[in-house]
Image (cartoon, grey):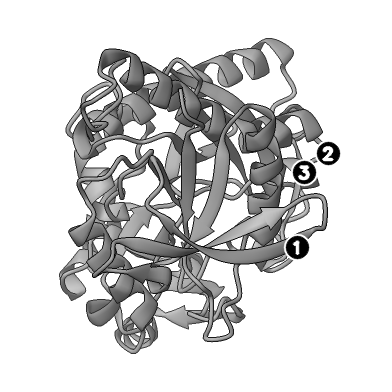
Amino acid sequence: MPQPVLGILTLYLNDNRLLEERSIYQKMTVAGAKMGLRVLVFTPEDVNYKQHRIHAMFYHPETRQWTRKWTPFPDMIFDRCRIQRSYRFEQLKRFRSVYGHLTFLNRPLRNKWTVYKRLSGESRFRPYLPYTRMIEGKRDIQDMLLKYPLLYLKPINGTGGRGILRIERQQRGTWLIQGRDHSRRIIKPSTVSASALHNKLAAWDMKQRKYIIQQGIAIKLSGGRVHDYRMLVQKNRQGEWEVTGCAGRVGAPGSITSNLHGGGHAMMMSTLLKRWIGDEAKQKKVVEDAEQFSVQVAAYLEQSYGRLCELALDLAIDRSGQIWLLEVNPKPAREVFARAGDRHTYQQAIIKPLEYALGLYQRKSRRSDNDPIQTGPDNA
């Protein structure tokens, strides 16, 4: 059997061809070589559509250098492209359209609103979902303000905490509003009247960017910082979903989110959960329920949207131990585990997509040495 090739599809962050996860791709190249899997990296800009070849990037561990080489398409593609408001994302959409018949380890997931609607259609998931509405007009906000004392407003395609607002009911009909702008800068908290609140929100460009409004969960620690948990689920070599690990995240002072890029810090889940919920039996039950729920969500979303190989679920856990799904991330970073001091989970997070890719290739090859590998959810 020839050596299989995995292509990591990514996007440059700017016109200087900066790659966000270059160090991760280097680690994947080294790990892949040890298991007999060749790894290359490319972007839609590197594709020759006439010759169907790629000017791909290859990492050489012995020299710690990157080189480029024209090469045929890989056997499998690991799509690591995150949403950008740039021409590069338009190039990505063209690539996915032209080469959608190729074997992708993971298909694109939909936006926050579409995923919420899909999950809320299943009765088993509803208890875990904060009530959420699409903002189509002032009435949607007004209804939620009357119903819940704490709310979050999020762009449906936002990442890294950008453009998120937190609104909390205060005494005498006022509201505390805080958040981050679309450049991730912290907005100075302010207390406003109901009428002033609506004026502020009207200037937030929610129609053009498309926003949801979500029931808020009380997750502030005793020091006032918010916290949540990043649960990573990935497929193993056999194509089965399993939990790789979970880390706790604590937001920066004054931040309404726990994102590491926004100044948050990470710690072991057990450490943070012990601080939040003292009862050991309840802690154990919460962890078991969170892991079972996360695997079920991953499997269900794959049935809905096509083959996936990993997902990160951002979970809130309230004081009673109730688990709430805040967000599903189809292109999760791995550094949260390194920053939490969990080196084993960090290494597993890097290796598992490679093991899954190799297992998928071998299963498909055994079925037919001549037929092309088919796309679709992995049901091997």
Q: Give the amino acid type for the residue marked by disc 1 in the picture.
A: Gln
In the displayed structure image, the side of residue 169 where residue 33 appears, left or right: right
Quarter holding the N terminus is top left
- Callout in the foreground (2, 1): 1
The residue under label 3 is which amino acid type? Ala
User: Which image quarter is the C terminus in?
Assistant: top left
User: Which percent across, then down, holds residue 176?
Assistant: 52, 72
Q: Nearer the viewer, residue 372 or 206?
A: 372
Occupied quadrant, residue 207: bottom left
Of the numbered discs 3 and 1, the one sitting upstream in the chain is 1
**Which residue is disc 3 drawn over?**
338
| Element class at badge 3 | helix
Label 1 sits on residue: 65
Q: For the residues labelled 3 and 1, say whether their Cβ atoms are less than 8 Å apart.
A: no
Tell me if 155 is positioned left or right of 188 in this view: left
Q: Tell me the residue that label 2 is attached to.
A: 341
Helix, strand or loop status at disc 2: loop
Q: Percent from the top left, x then y, of residue 24?
A: 67, 51
Q: Nearer the viewer, residue 255 or 23?
A: 23
Query: Is residue 323 shown to the viewer in this render?
Result: yes
Of 300 and 164, nearer the camera is: 300
The crowd level at tag 1 (other Cα within 10 Å; few <14, some 14-19, many 20+) is: few
Tell me if label 2 and label 3 are in contact, CB under 8 Å: yes
